[in-house]
């Protein structure tokens, strides 16, 4: 049986990331024992609430000026990315929400909805596909990132200085929380998942922890034998 606490205890954030954004914090959640399933009434209600919230916020404020989204756009500019071309995950979802979020399966629906409702970038990755622990670093350039370009399998490489999540094999998510790699992406039969919730000011620690609690309140119902481990990481 996988030791979820040991897995998370080996996760690291490189000091160079904290030098870029000293206010960066994360909650990492490892979950095992999920029973895969189609979208259901609970995930539908959560998505509907997220869509309604996004419409209400964007009726008053442009998406790129919502406080938590604006903070991530500034972080992207700090390492040379253009946020109007490579949108952080919470911005991309919030923009989609006004027209309707995708319905994928109950697991993906839950974490997409929680991301929008709490305005926090939230990635879900297949834990069984990881090699070693997750690390957040500033890339040097040669690290491999497996993706699809124009419908064809491809290996790309991050820009030097780009903030990336990676494991021992390569990059698992580019530009902090922009695009996940294919190797560790969730699939319809995933039973073990790593969730990463990223935060910058003005999101408070309490708000970040509340987002994690909302996620867990829904994920833990996805099977009678779900096991969970959680870790808060910050520049202390």
Image: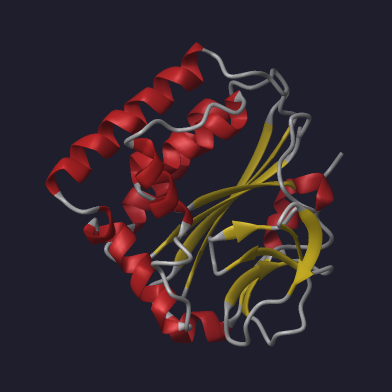
Q: Residue 164, percent across and down?
A: 62, 71
Q: Quadrant of residue 214?
A: top left
Task: Where is residue 39? Give x, y as percent.
Answer: 58, 19
Count of labels in the image = 0
Image x and y of residue 42, in percent: 48, 16
Q: Which residue shows up at 63% across the image and 22% down it?
A: 222
Q: Is residue 165 left or right of residue 200?
A: right
Q: Is residue 216 left or right of residue 170?
A: left
Quarter of the image with the N terminus in it? top right
The answer to whether one can see residue 210 in this image is no
Left or right: 87 as drawn, with respect to 206: right
Quarter of the image where one finds residue 141 = bottom right
Quarter-of-image position of residue 11: bottom right
Tell me if I can see residue 157 in this picture. Answer: yes
- Camera-side residue: 210 or 138? 138
Query: At 60% from the left edge and 59% from the top edge, which residue is drawn?
Result: 179
Q: Is residue 142 above or below residue 101?
A: below
Residue drawn at x 59%, y 24% is: 106
Q: How is the image coloured?
A: secondary structure
């Amino acid at each position: 049986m996988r030791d979820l606490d040991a897995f998370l205890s080996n996760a690291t954030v490189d000091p160079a990331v904290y030098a870029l954004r000293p206010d960066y914090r994360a909650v990492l959640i490892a979950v095992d024992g999920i029973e895969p399933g189609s979208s259901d009434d609970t995930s539908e209600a959560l998505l509907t609430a997220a869509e309604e919230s996004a419409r209400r916020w964007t009726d008053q404020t442009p998406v790129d000026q919502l406080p938590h989204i604006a903070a991530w756009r500034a972080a992207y500019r700090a390492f040379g990315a253009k946020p109007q071309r490579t949108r952080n995950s919470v911005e991309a979802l919030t923009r989609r929400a006004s027209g309707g979020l995708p319905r994928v399966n109950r697991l993906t629906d839950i974490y997409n909805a929680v991301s929008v409702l709490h305005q926090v970038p939230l990635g879900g990755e297949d834990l069984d596909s990881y090699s070693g622990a997750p690390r957040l670093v500033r890339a040097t350039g040669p690290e491999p990132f497996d993706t699809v370009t124009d419908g064809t399998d491809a290996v790309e490489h991050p820009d030097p200085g780009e903030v990336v999540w990676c494991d021992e094999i390569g990059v698992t998510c580019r530009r902090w929380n922009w695009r996940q790699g294919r190797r560790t992406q969730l699939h319809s039969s995933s039973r073990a998942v790593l969730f990463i919730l990223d935060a910058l000011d003005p999101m408070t620690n309490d708000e970040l922890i509340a987002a994690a609690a909302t996620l867990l309140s829904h994920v833990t119902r996805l099977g009678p034998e779900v096991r969970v481990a959680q870790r808060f990481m910050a520049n202390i």
